[in-house]
Image (spheres, rainbow, N blue to C red):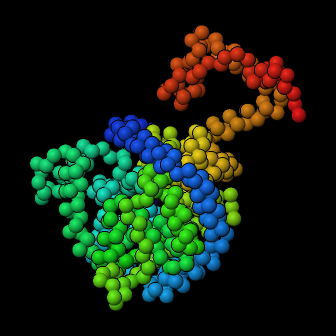
Amino acid sequence: MSALRPTTPRFKQNVREALANENIQAAMRNYGSGFVNKRAAARAAMAEFDDIRDAARDLKNHTLANLDLYLARYEAEVLEAGGHVHWAETAEDARRIVLEICRDAGATTVNKGKTMISEECGINDWLEENGIRPVETDLGEYIIQLRGETPSHIIAPAVHVTVPEVDELFREKHAHLDAGRRLDHASMLSEARAVLREKYFQAEVGITGANMLIAETGQSVIVTNEGNGDLSQSLPKVHIVMASLEKVVPTLEDAATVLRVLARSATGQEMSVYTTFSAGPKRDTDPDGPEEYHVVLLDNGRTNMLGTEFQEMLRCIRCGACMNHCPVYQAVGGHAYGWVYPGPMGAVLTPSLIGVETGGQLPNASTFCGRCEAVCPMRIPLPKMMRHWREREFEKRLTPSAARWGLAFWRALAARPGLYRMATRMGAFGLRLMAMGKGRLAKLPMGGGWTDHRDFPAPQGGTFQSRWKAMGGRRR
């Protein structure tokens, strides 16, 4: 699956394949509780956590309302520090800019820290097509690069891969190393480290993402737990930062506010192991660092979200908490979503960036349980925005005909209260009869999407309207 060729229109097929894949199901069963429990413990340990969430939300709202001013200030500070800023309206523009920088540097190899923007732009495929070898240095990204895949999670790219699968992969790809090593995490980690250490000294260019861009200082900020981001940007002679426009924050103090909720929401840590601030190429007094520093700022549809009901999505800090808590994501994994951004945040962001015609199925992949909004450190109302996308899908007549006919039928009944009450009474009575006193139905006509996986509860008691009437309710 390529970031340049979204497979979101075949979402239902992707889901069926994921549910039938035993390895994916095994991996997803093991992954969810760890993130959830660690986040809950970190949340409980900080009494002011919700106050900081409010502050982070407010500062991002302020930044988005004044985005042009802060981006201009950020560019000025980068230039003052000796760096270069490149504005990319589209993914194609970003690819062209990155290739030009690499060619000017005479690069044959590029080391990459984990960056979702490079996934969005399809940088790896693009560089390879033009004779430049990209090497992912984040362990999860390295694993999926060897597998020829894209990330299935924004902070744990290889969460869908089991340990035996990694063992088999390394034995195939690292044949020059000791094939007799044990099947355990430590051995495989040491093996990957030994391979990647060589790569750090071969690359002429390093590419990283950015968790934040600080307008006050012109710095980019990355958070990692492996240190690969530091090596990818300090050892090559050219450092390229790829970031989207909304990553800018006004001040260092604002960045600190966001950092206090970022790691706690993502991995349950107080802070990531490495939090790195970068600004410009190395100075004459610096012992190491890049000779050139470039920032590629990507729009790719984000400014079209400003001033719309989807603007709040631009507050997202890519912590992954929404997908860690999402029952749909936990069942099918990230690749089922068919593009770069999975889970609830992807269900809103993907149609915003590539269009509801292509990504319109994703907002329907939600139970609307509300867990994503409840845990989001930036208090993004994800269910509300998914409902907005469902409305857009319906307005453009992209909703499946069965759903449209079903809604039309319900509307006809709801507009006739007497007929509606009679139909609901008859329906409840019929379902009780079909249950034959068991209180549940193992099979339900036209309800296989439910009963293929679980029993359907049979109605008990009267309808809502009859109970409301019996309790003395009245219209206001």
Q: Is residue 121 above or below residue 333?
A: below
**What residue is at 56 percent from the left and 73 percent from the top?**
251
Farthest residue, direction bottom: 284
**What residue is at 56 percent from the left and 68 percent from the top?**
254
Residue 235 image point, x, y percent: 29, 76
Residue 450 image point, x, y percent: 54, 28
Q: Nearer the viewer, residue 220 or 429?
A: 220
Quadrant location of the C terminus in the rendered image? top right
Residue 454 image point, x, y percent: 50, 25
Q: Is residue 141 left or right of residue 415?
A: left
The answer to which image quadrant residue 203 occupies is bottom left
Farthest residue, direction top: 437
Q: Is residue 264 above or below residue 243?
A: above
Q: Is residue 70 left or right of residue 220?
A: right
Residue 109 image point, x, y percent: 28, 73
**What residue is at 57 percent from the left and 27 percent from the top?**
447
**What residue is at 21 percent from the left and 46 percent from the top?**
184
The answer to which image quadrant residue 142 occupies is bottom left
Quadrant location of the N terminus in the rendered image? bottom left
Q: Nearer the viewer, residue 134 or 270?
A: 270
Residue 90 visible in image: no
Residue 188 visible in image: yes
Instruction: Give the tally of numbered discs.
Output: 0
The answer to which image quadrant residue 122 occupies is bottom left
